[in-house]
Image (spheres, rainbow, N blue to C red):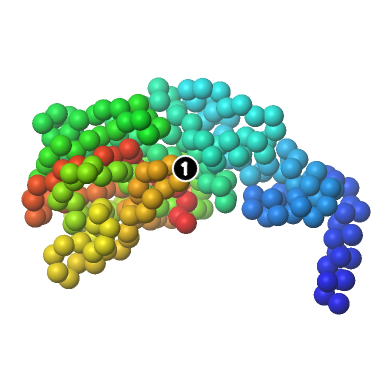
Amino acid sequence: MADRSLVVLIDFFASLPEGFISDIISLTSPVDAARLSVISKGFKAAAESDSVWTKFLPLDLNGILLRSRSPVVYSNKKELYSALCNSPILLDDGTKLSFSLDKRTGKKCFMVAARELDITWGNKQFYWELKSHPNSRFSEVANLRSVCWLDIRAVIATNMLSATTDYAAYLVFRLSDTAYGLESAKSLVRFVSQESDEEAENRANWVNLFGGEPSGGSQTSNELPRERSDGWMEVEMGSFYNDRGDDGDVEARLIEIWDLNWKSGLIVEGIEFRPKS
């Protein structure tokens, strides 16, 4: 009986004008639109129409695309959506920021490149060096030679991000074969205008970039590193709710400034701000 009711419902919607079906689908999500497109030819045409996929794209997308280093090639808005989900674009001069879309939601994702990170002693080649990496989207990554004071920060304006969205910040990195000293660090995310460094440090999360629990007895990892689809590793640094984009700057930070043990072998591509999984 339930199956018969479903067939009747599908037949009813299939009898409606395509534009009306498109309006309904545009109120769902990209995932739902993809599912609905397999119901019938009528639903497929409606679900793949520009009017639907335009609703899933950010309102300020045209301005972002104008900042791209190279044009995004597409023949319809669904292709544009797919391209931005699967192939991040470099903005401005290509050394500072990349942009992509979250595949599930169409929300904006930005990665702050290593060159744009505020790294303590990052401009001292004895401690850090910027160099190319064959697997990086950016022209340079930050390679940690040796430091005892680890402090890496990324800042982004909340008005650049999608509103009313739960975000997280992720350190995107690799470890060299000879990496050491990265078993215990802390990470945090804070609104710069609302919380001091000291307040944020007191609630920071412990992370072990090698995976597993940090060294030091009672410390426990809140997040474990995981491999990304692009071959890099990532670890969540913290999360926040972006309301209307009027909270000013938000900062993500990785720190180990207490034990002062020497550390080496961390390769940082950037810090990514994207909707929380």
**Image position, residue 101 (x, y; %):** 53, 42
Left or right, 9 with reference to 276: right
Q: Residue at x 57, y 51 (%)?
A: 104
**Image position, residue 204 (x, y; %):** 25, 59
**Image position, residue 22 (x, y; %):** 78, 47
Q: Quadrant of the N terminus?
A: bottom right
Residue lying farthest right? Answer: 15
Q: Residue at x 84, y 48 (%)?
A: 41
Which residue was labeled with disc 1?
Answer: 109
Q: Residue at x 25, y 53 (%)?
A: 209
Q: Is residue 71 above or below residue 221?
A: above
**Can residue 73 be seen from the camera position used here?**
yes
Q: Residue at x 70, y 51 (%)?
A: 33
Total label count?
A: 1
Camera-side residue of 229 and 69: 229
Q: Is residue 153 above or below residue 15?
A: above
